[in-house]
Image (tube, rainbow, N blue to C red):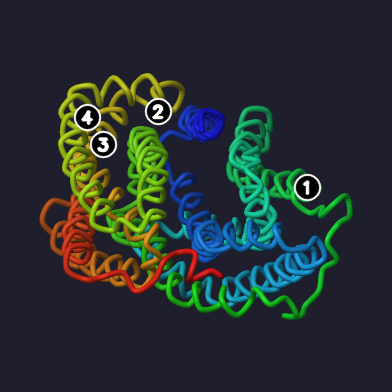
Amino acid sequence: MARVAVFVLLGRCAGAAKEMVIAYRYGISHVVDAYQITLTLVSWLPGACSAVFAIVLVPAFVELRRQSAKEESQFLGELVAWAMVVGVLFTAILYLVWPYALQFMAGGLSVTTREMARQMLLVMAPIGVLIMIETAYGTRLQSKERHIGTLLDGLPAVMTLLLVLFMTEKSAMVPLMWGTLLGYAVFVLVVWPLGGKVEGHYARLSLTFRSHRWQPIYHAVRVFMLGQLVVSCSPALDQYFVAHLGDGAVATLGYANRVFGLLISMGALAIAQGTLPVLSDILGKDDVTRARQTAFQWSLLMLGAGTLCAVVAYPLAPWMVQVIFQRGAFTAGNTMLVAELMRYALVQLPFYFAALVMMNLLSVEGRYKDMAVVTALAFVVKVIANVVLTRWIGMPGVLLATGMMHAAVFCLSMIIARRVPPACRTGDLIA
């Protein structure tokens, strides 16, 4: 677990370093607006699939490894082949709907920004295919408890960082779009030999469904995918609302989310490592009542811990933003604007930490349908809050709306966990 924590921390540091270099060179500008909108749209659907893979496919690979190498190789080859097909399909759809999606997402931005985003798409759209491929191989590595894939997640950020630092192209968007694309390409080239071999031989790609694992996986994905798609919509939804506030708004929100993300990701990692093994062990002894009591107690504890973290971080927000970003094109005025947004984001901390404990309980009980219902209802709360709060207070409204979404997840998951018995276990669902 310590190794996983180190790898996650290094990956986060790579992402933060990339944002520091982007802030130094571009500040809060329309270039960053175009880049963030494009990256969000090209990675939305593949990112949702990636999260589902991590939940559903890891147990499947563990079980296959206990059976036979032939069956594992067949399933891996079919998985990677279909992942490529789905990635190509996502990319084709994006090319077709891009003019309409860009007008919808960035209608409030300048013509220059929208044209820059259109040109970025022509280069960055294949990222969806690369994400699908590396996710398939990375999931198998994770099932073998080889967490090198977590470290390799930082490769796109590192490549972008290097190109932004050392490329002197007149076009400001060239290092951003090519750095991200090449980073994902290198990621795939590295993870392929690590995760693509079964007993020393590469799995043969095949567009078939001969493996007997597909049917139970289909049922699990069908239940879980809806909730994950909803969760993945949140960043795009926020960008839609702030983009209509004019140039620079998307970039400002992105910087605030990056600093806040460093806080929230470390807390989420600690909670996952602390709760998932314990809850799984208790449920393994068929003690559902004790598992729920433990989760309820921990969720209340995390509610208090998150509140304490928010209180401590509030006065430190300007200092954190200044240390990370304030240099080059990123001015002191930008620092105060981003720090103020980050302070609004802190309201999310208590509810996010508490909700994570309860969602982990539902996960170890294999209640994916309940998780999908909770996330869908919470997303409705998010949409309504975005509409109301952005009209009232502007850009900070999207951050407060996210806090309301996490509060809804916490409350709904508490109610469901108390009143609805688990229909099945994770192992039963995947087996």
SS type, badge 4: helix
Quadrant containing the C terminus is bottom right
319 lies left or right of 229: left
Comparing marks 1 and 4, which lies closer to the viewer?
Answer: 4
Judge whether residue 175 can be spotted in this image: no
Callout 4 amino acid:
Cys
Callout 1 amino acid:
Leu
State the separation of the CA atoms marked 3 and 4: 13 Å
SS type, badge 1: helix
Callout 2 amino acid:
Phe
Label 3: how many Cα within 10 Å (few below 14, some 14–19, many 20+): many
Q: Are marks 2 and 1 in contact (CB under 8 Å)?
A: no
* Residue under numbered circle 1: 189
Residue at horizontal 28 percent and vertical 52 percent from the top: 291
State the separation of the CA atoms marked 2 and 4: 27 Å
Callout 3 amino acid:
Met
Comparing marks 1 and 3, which lies closer to the viewer?
Answer: 1
* Residue under numbered circle 4: 309
Comparing marks 3 and 4, which lies closer to the viewer?
Answer: 4
Query: Residue 336: where, in percent of width, then height?
Result: 25, 28
* Residue under numbered circle 2: 330
Residue nearer the viewer, 427 or 121: 427
Among numbered discs 2 and 1, the one appearing first in the sequence: 1
Query: Residue 217: where, in percent of width, then height?
Result: 57, 73
Residue nearer the viewer, 406 or 345: 406
Judge whether residue 417 can be spotted in this image: yes
Query: Residue 94: where, in percent of width, then height?
Result: 57, 71
373 lies left or right of 82: left
